[in-house]
């Protein structure tokens, strides 16, 4: 995109907002005719033609053939120009970082997975994220002027509207983390919560892509427990960006202290960290597992150990996982009763491709939810796996760049 076009859509003028609205329409519908745009903007055909011409001249859109309607002159179809701009998505995990690049049409052209990293709440750890992004740009010979936005997904409480992070890297309370990253990297940066990123990835490019749904709940069962809400096709943030704290619903009287500082949170019994604790306790109590030697040697179990044991059909690990699924299903049933979504997506590190966890969640949901509500809700296992967060980060980078001020 030309600097002039970027300046136009940044202005809160009628002309600028019309151009921004056309871009968002094409993001949602891929192609449109001049008549489609005129109807969408409530403007005349000549006005729509002028807007489309200026978007073409600005490098944002291009002609993509004609709409074959059987009779008369075929109208020209317009779509986004893939070379109009690029977006970087960064998905920060506990022990590694994934970074990717998409073009304006949403096609991923570069993906770097498993970049070693240790997530710590220190200025040094934040600096490493910045350095890895700059190395990614250099490694793939990208020009910063062509990068329209970078979105970084990190765990914890994030307000994507203000750009503040309240759990990690909150070293300058008077300055948003997004602003600090933008200054350090030299390019526009937005941030969001990791679970919302995964939810958006699955909704736009994963298991929900071809289902035609507008509402979905994404349950992230990983080291912790999170929830991403998609309502009317849009991510729901809540007033302060803290929506989706499923793991911190008070459910149990177990006196287990959660990392949030409260006791009895759902996450204390249903999460990767809870599964580690339970498996270790049962092995020390005399039960057998492929993990027994490691536990008896005094080693702490990691998520990768649990996932590997489950893939080997270790009975103890599968039993603990099934119990967690039944408990989680009861709480998801409550969410279904409240939101009446079209789709529930079970994702995260513990959501295996065989759908073992999903099966137990679904059985519990059928037991505890109202059948008249549940009958229209599908429950599916996420399909993108570890790619969900990266794809979601890339798609969020594009979406955030073109957010309309009226929303």
Image (tube, rainbow, N blue to C red):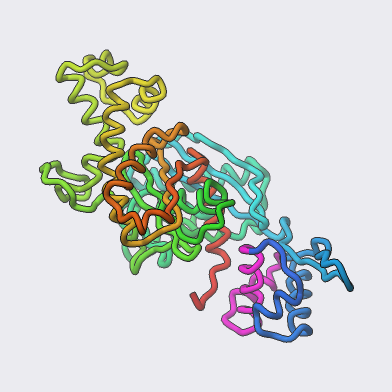
Q: Quadrant of residue 267?
A: top left
Looking at this rendering, what residue extends furthest in the front direction? Answer: 372
User: For the point 44% across and 36% down, which residue is it?
Assistant: 96
The front one of 370 and 239 is 370
Does residue 405 sit above or below 331 in this rendering? below
Q: How many marks?
A: 0
Quadrant, the N terminus: bottom right
The front one of 80 and 287 is 287
Can the viewer see residue 170 in this picture?
no
Residue 323 in the figure: left or right of residue 162: left
Q: Quadrant of residue 173?
A: bottom left
Q: Position of residue 62 (x, y in %)?
A: 78, 64
Can the viewer see residue 263 in this picture?
yes
Q: Position of residue 135 (x, y in %)?
A: 57, 42
Does residue 404 sit above or below 286 in this rendering? below
The span shown in magenta is: 1-28
User: For the point 68% across and 61% down, which residue is it?
Assistant: 30
The front one of 268 and 117 is 268
Q: Quadrant of residue 163?
A: bottom left
User: For the point 39% across and 33% down, which residue is it?
Assistant: 356
Does residue 248 sit above or below 68 in this rendering? above
Q: Is residue 23 magenta?
A: yes
Q: Position of residue 302 (x, y in %)?
A: 32, 28
The secondary structure that most of the magenta stretch takes on is helix
The front one of 143 and 306 is 306
Residue 397 in the figure: left or right of residue 283: right
Q: Is residue 345 magenta?
A: no
Q: Position of residue 78 (x, y in %)?
A: 76, 66
Looking at this rendering, what residue extends furthest in the right direction? Answer: 72
């Amino acid at each position: 995109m030309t600097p002039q076009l970027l300046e136009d859509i940044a202005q809160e003028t009628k002309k600028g907002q019309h151009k921004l609205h056309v871009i968002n329409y094409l993001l949602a519908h891929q192609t449109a005719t001049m008549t489609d745009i005129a109807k969408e903007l409530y403007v005349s055909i000549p006005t729509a033609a002028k807007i489309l011409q200026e978007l073409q001249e600005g490098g944002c859109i291009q002609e993509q053939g004609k709409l074959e309607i059987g009779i008369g002159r075929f109208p020209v179809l317009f779509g986004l120009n893939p070379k109009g701009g690029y977006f970087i998505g960064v998905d920060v995990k506990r022990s590694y970082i994934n970074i990717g690049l998409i073009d304006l049409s949403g096609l991923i052209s570069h993906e770097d997975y498993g970049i070693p990293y240790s997530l710590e709440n220190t200025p040094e750890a934040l600096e490493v994220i910045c350095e890895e992004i700059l190395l990614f740009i250099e490694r793939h010979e990208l020009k910063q002027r062509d990068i329209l936005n970078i979105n970084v997904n990190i765990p914890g409480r994030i307000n994507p509207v203000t750009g503040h992070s309240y759990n990690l890297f909150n070293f300058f309370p008077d300055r948003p983390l997004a602003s600090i990253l933008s200054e350090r990297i030299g390019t526009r940066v937005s941030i969001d919560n990791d679970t919302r990123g995964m939810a958006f990835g699955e909704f736009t490019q994963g298991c929900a892509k071809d289902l035609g749904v507008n509402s979905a709940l994404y349950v992230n069962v990983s080291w912790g427990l999170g929830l991403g809400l998609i309502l009317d096709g849009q991510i729901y943030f809540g007033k302060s960006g803290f929506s989706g704290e499923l793991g911190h619903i008070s459910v149990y009287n177990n006196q287990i202290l959660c990392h949030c500082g409260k006791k009895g949170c759902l996450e204390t019994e249903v999460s990767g960290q809870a599964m580690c604790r339970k498996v270790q306790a049962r092995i020390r109590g005399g039960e057998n597992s492929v993990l027994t030697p490691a536990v008896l040697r005094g080693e702490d179990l990691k998520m990768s150990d649990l996932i590997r044991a489950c893939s080997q059909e270790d009975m103890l690990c599968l039993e603990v996982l099934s119990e967690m699924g039944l408990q989680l299903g009861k709480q998801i049933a409550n969410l279904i009763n409240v939101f009446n979504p079209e789709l529930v997506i079970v994702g995260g590190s513990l959501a295996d491709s065989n759908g073992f966890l999903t099966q137990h969640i679904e059985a519990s949901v059928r037991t505890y939810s109202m059948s008249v509500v549940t009958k229209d809700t599908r429950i599916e296992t996420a399909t993108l796996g570890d790619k969900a967060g990266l794809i979601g980060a890339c798609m969020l980078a594009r979406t955030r760049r073109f957010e309309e001020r009226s929303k």
